[in-house]
Image (spheres, grey):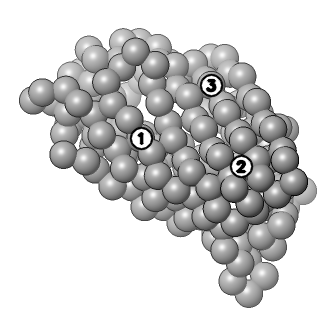
Amino acid sequence: MTKRLEQELTYDAPLADVAAMLRDPSFREKVCTRQRVLSHQIDITDDGDAADIRIERLQAVEKIPSFAAKVVGDQITIVQREEWSDLHQGTYSVGIPDKPGHISGTVTLTERGGRCVETISLDIKVSIPLVGGKLEGVVHGLLTSALRTEHEVGTAHLAG
C-alpha cells in the first residue's frame, strides 16, 4: 500500500523570488537549523532555470511510536533530492539509506496574483510486512511537519 501526501505552501512573493529562495544555500541552512538536525550537507547545482538540490541530514529520532523507532533506530540519515527542470516544476524524492521504503513525487511552483504556491505531491511506500502501512503514516506525519517548518522559515526568509 502507498500513502499519498499533498501539500500546498503559499508565499507572499512572486514565483521568481520563491524559486531563487529554494536554490539559496543560506535558506536551506536555516531550514536545517530550525529542524535541529545533528549534521547536514547541502549541494545545489544551477544550470540556467534548471537546478539539482541534494540535502543530506542526520537527525535524532524523537517522538515516534516505539514500533517505528525499532526500525529506524535513534538517529536517521535522510537524503532529500529536488531536480528542477525549470523554475516551475521538478521531481522530489526522499530516501533513507539502508532502510526499506521510498518517497517520490513532484514539486511545482505556480503564481497566482503576485503570490507563489509551491505544491508538493509525494507517494510514500514502506516495504515491511505487517508494519509498512503504519510506518507510512508515521513518515507522512514527519514529512508534513518538516514541510510546515520549511514554509515558516521560507516566509521569514522572503520577508527579509
Q: Name the residue under label 1.
A: 103
Is residue 18 shown to the viewer in this render? yes
Instruction: From the top left corner, tell me how far across and down residue 81 is, in percent.
Output: 60, 38
Q: What element carries label 3?
A: strand
Q: Which amino acid does label 3 sit on?
A: Glu
Q: Which amino acid does label 1 sit on?
A: Ile
Q: Name the residue under label 3.
A: 56
Q: Residue at x 74, y 60 (%)?
A: 86
Q: Residue at x 15, y 30 (%)?
A: 131
Kindly identify which numbered label has been placed on residue 17.
Answer: none
In the displayed structure, 74 sits above or below 143; it is above
Quarter holding residue 154: bottom right
Q: What element carries label 2?
A: helix
Q: Mark 2 points at which residue?
A: 153
Whichever of labels 3 and 1 marks the residue nearer the N terminus, that label is 3
Whichever of labels 2 and 3 marks the residue nearer the N terminus, that label is 3
Closer-to-camera residue (22/147): 22
Cβ atoms under marks 2 and 3 closer than 8 Å: no
Is residue 13 shown to the viewer in this render? no
How much space separates mark 2 and mark 3, taking CA atoms? 18 Å
